[in-house]
Image (tube, rainbow, N blue to C red):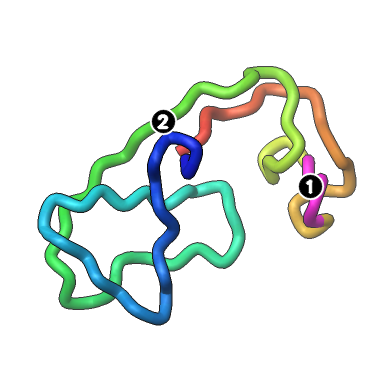
Amino acid sequence: MQSHGAQPVDIHCFRFNPGLLIVIPENNTHVFGIPPGVPASQQLGEIKTNPWIATMRPEVGAGFYFSGWGPLPFAFGAVPPER
């Protein structure tokens, strides 16, 4: 996302301006939500990925960087889209 102009959020200094788009991935670790008191609307988006192979999807047992999501570095199967 940074290669397309997105900037990471500093979790220690929340500064959200009106109209700001914040993307929170579903398939990630150490994910945090919008702080309480910040008015926000939510919208779910999906990005289609390779539908038959994955490196980081607990649904198919793939945990390339994290064995808690699966015993395999990659897995073949029905891979859901990223949200």
The residue located at (75%, 52%) in the rendering is: 69
Q: Which residue is mark 2?
A: 46
Image quadrant in which you'd find residue 4:
top left
Q: Earlier in the sequence, mark 2 or mark 1?
A: 2
- Other-residue count near label 1 (Cα within 10 Å), few / some / many at <14 / 14–19 / ≥20: many
Give the residue at the far bottom of this rendering.
Answer: 12
Q: Position of residue 14 (x, y in %)?
A: 30, 74
In terms of secondary structure, where does tag 2 sit?
Answer: loop
Above-or-below relation of 53 to 33: above
State yes or no: residue 47 in magenta. no
Q: Quadrant of residue 18?
A: bottom left
35 sits left or right of 1 in the view: left
The mark total stands at: 2
Amino acid carrying mark 1 in the image: Gly
Q: Which mark is residue 63?
A: 1
Which residue occupies the foreground of this view, 26 or 11?
11
The residues tagged by marks 2 and 1 sit, at their Cα atoms, a distance apart of 21 Å
| Residue at screen point 51% across, 22% down | 48
Residue 59 picture location, percent across and down:
67, 40
- Chain part drawn in magenta: 62-66
Q: Is 32 rendered above or below residue 82?
A: below
Q: Residues within 10 Å of mark 2 (few under 14, many from 20)?
A: few
Residue shown at 16% from the left, 59% from the top: 40
Badge 2 amino acid: Glu
Quick check: 19 left or right of 4? left
Q: Residue at x 42, y 74 (%)?
A: 11
What element does badge 1 sit on? strand
Prevailing secondary structure class for the magenta stretch in the rendered image: loop
Dot 2 and dot 1 residues touching (CB under 8 Å): no
- In percent of width and height, residue 64 lies at 82, 45
